[in-house]
Amino acid sequence: MSARLQPRGDYEVVIGLEVHVHMRTASKLFSPAPVRYGELPNHATHPLDLGMPGVLPVLNRRAVELGVRAALATHCKVHSRSIFARKNYFYPDLPKGYQISQYEEPLATEGWLEIEAPSADGTPHTVRVGLTRIHIEEDAGKSIHDAAIAGSAGSHVDLNRAGVPLLEIVSEPDLRSPEEAAAYLRKLRALLRWADVSDADMEKGQFRCDANVSLRRHGAAQLGTRTELKNLNSFRFVEEALYAEIARQAALLDGGGRVVQATMHYDPVRRATRVMRLKENADDYRYFPDPDLVPLVIAESEIDAVRRALPELPEDRRARFESEHALSGYDARLLTESRALADFYEAAAIRSGQPKVVANWMLRDVLAQLKERDCEIDATQLTPDALAKLIALVEDGRVTAASARPLVAVLIERGVDPETLVRERGLEAVSDTGLLEAAADEVIAAHPEVVAQIRGGDARGLNFLMGQLMKRTEGKANPKAVREILARKLAG
Ligand code: ADP
Ligand code: MG
C-alpha cells in the first residue's frame, strides 16, 4: 500500500482541527432574536444578546436536536447529561464578558469521520479521523474596523451574530498533511449539509476552522509543540496557511530552535504566518458551570427519535449504490457528494431502470455541466424524469448519443421535454432503411480497399465505414441499424 502523503520528508506533520459551525435554526441559542445574515447591524438582537443585566437565557430546543444529529452522523457517543459553562474573556464583541459554552461535560465525545487521504503516488486510501468532542456554544458578535463597511471611521460592534447557535467539532490530531486537513473539512461540511444541521456557507461565516499543527521526528513517541492558526475561512487558505506554518516550524527546528505554543495569523498576501498572541491556557478562561442554566438532560428516547429522523447517511448510501446498483466504489462516491445529487441520481435510476447507464450520464455529462456552471443539481431545471427520458430515447435508438449529449446543457438551462426538444431540433436518428441502404452502398463503393480488408477477415475497417456513414447522415444514423446493414452487405 502506498504511504499517506507527507509534505516534509524529515518531519512527521501532525494536524488537529477545530471547526465552528452555525446550526440552521430560526432563532438564537438562548434568545428569541432571529438568526439572519446581511441584516442591518444590531437589528437581529435581543436584550440578552446585548448583555443586558437581569435577562435569563432559555435554551433553544432545535439547536440541541441539531447538535445530536451532528453527533450521531459522526458516530459520537451522545451524553444524556451535559453542562453549559461560562468561558470568561474580555472582548468588545462580547458584552456579557463571557461566552456560554460547554467544557467539562460536552454534548458528545469519541466519534469519527472517514476521509479519502491523498498519497504520494496518487491512489487515495481511507483514513479514519477521530473526533474528540462536539459541544454546543453561542457565537460572539463582530468587531468592524473597516470604514467602508461601517460607514464611518473607528471601530464598530455588530451583535447580530452574538448568540447564534454553534457547534464546535474538535478532531484528534490524526491528520498528516494539509491535503488531508482539506479533505476532512470537505467531508465534514458535506456531512453537516447532508444531515440538515447547517448550510455551512463559508462566505457567511457559517463554517470556520482553526488548525493546530506540530512537527516531530519520524518515530518520535511524543507530539511536538503545536501552534494554532485562527479563523481560516476557505479550504484554500487552510492548505496554504498550514504549508506556510509547517515551513516556519521546520526552519525553526532545523536551526536548533524550539516551537513556542502560540496562536498564529495567516497573511494570504505575504503567504506567511505570524504570532498573534502567545497561547492562553484553559485556566485563563476560568470556566465554571453557568448558574443561569440547569444541566442539559436528554432522554435516551429523545436521542432515538433524532436517530430515526436522520436521513440515510452518505456512507450507507454509497454502499447501497455499490451493492444494489452495481456501481463502482469511485462512481458511488462521486454520486453521494451531496444529498441532492444522490437523490437525483437515484430517482433517475429508478425511472430508467438502468442504474449503470444513468450513472454514466450523470458522471460524464451532468457533473461536467454543473461544474462549468458552479452550481448544485437542485438549482437547475433538469429533473430526474427528463434525464431518464433522454437516456431512453438514446437506448431506443431514436436519437444517437452524440446528438443527445449536448442536450443535457439545454435541459439544465430550460426544463423542456426531451422528446419535444429532439423533434424541434430535427435530431431524430435516421432509421429509414431505404436511406441508410443507399448511404451504405455509397460508402462501400467509395472504399474498395477497406472492404477487401474486411472481407479478408480483418474487422477493424468496419468502424471506419460506420464513421463514414455517420458523416453522411450528420451523425444522426441509428448506429444499430447501420451496423446491421453494413454487416449484411459486406457478408453478401
Ligand atoms: P484548545 O481548545 O486549547 O485549542 P484542545 O485540547 O481542545 O485545545 O485541542 C485543540 C486541537 O489541537 C485538537 O484538534 C487537537 O487534535 C489538536 N492538537 C492537540 N495537540 C496537538 C499537537 N501536538 N499537534 C497538532 N495538533 C494538536
Ligand atoms: Mg483551540
Image (cartoon, rainbow, N blue to C red):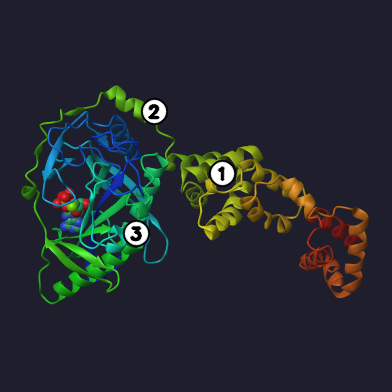
Q: Which residue is mark 1?
A: 345
Q: Amino acid at mark 2?
A: Arg
Q: Amino acid at mark 3?
A: Ser
The C terminus appears in which quarter of the rendering?
Answer: bottom right
Pinpoint residue 25: horizontal percent, then vertical percent.
34, 37
Label 2: few (<14), some (14–19) or many (≥20) C-alpha neighbours in 10 Å: few
Q: Nearer the viewer, mark 1 or mark 3?
A: 3
Q: Residue at x 40, y 44 (%)?
A: 193
| Left or right: residue 364 compared with residue 201 | right
Secondary element under disc 1, as helix, strand or loop, is helix
- CA gap between label 3 and label 2 equals 33 Å
Pinpoint residue 238: horizontal percent, then vertical percent.
30, 61
Q: Which residue is mark 3?
A: 234
Pinpoint residue 488: horizontal percent, then vertical percent.
89, 57
| Sequence-wise first label, 3 or 2 | 3
* Mark 2 CB lies closer than 8 A to ligand 1: no
Tell which of 196 and 476 is nearer to you. Answer: 196
Q: Nearer the viewer, mark 3 or mark 2?
A: 3
| Sequence-wise first label, 1 or 3 | 3
| Sequence-wise first label, 1 or 2 | 2
Pinpoint residue 304: horizontal percent, then vertical percent.
33, 26
- CA gap between label 1 and label 2 equals 24 Å
- Residue at the limit of the structure toward the bottom, as seen here: 255
The N terminus appears in which quarter of the rendering?
Answer: bottom left
**Residue 11 numbered tag:** none
* Mark 3 CB lies closer than 8 A to ligand 1: no
Q: Which residue is mark 2?
A: 308
Q: Amino acid at mark 1?
A: Tyr
Secondary element under disc 3, as helix, strand or loop, is loop
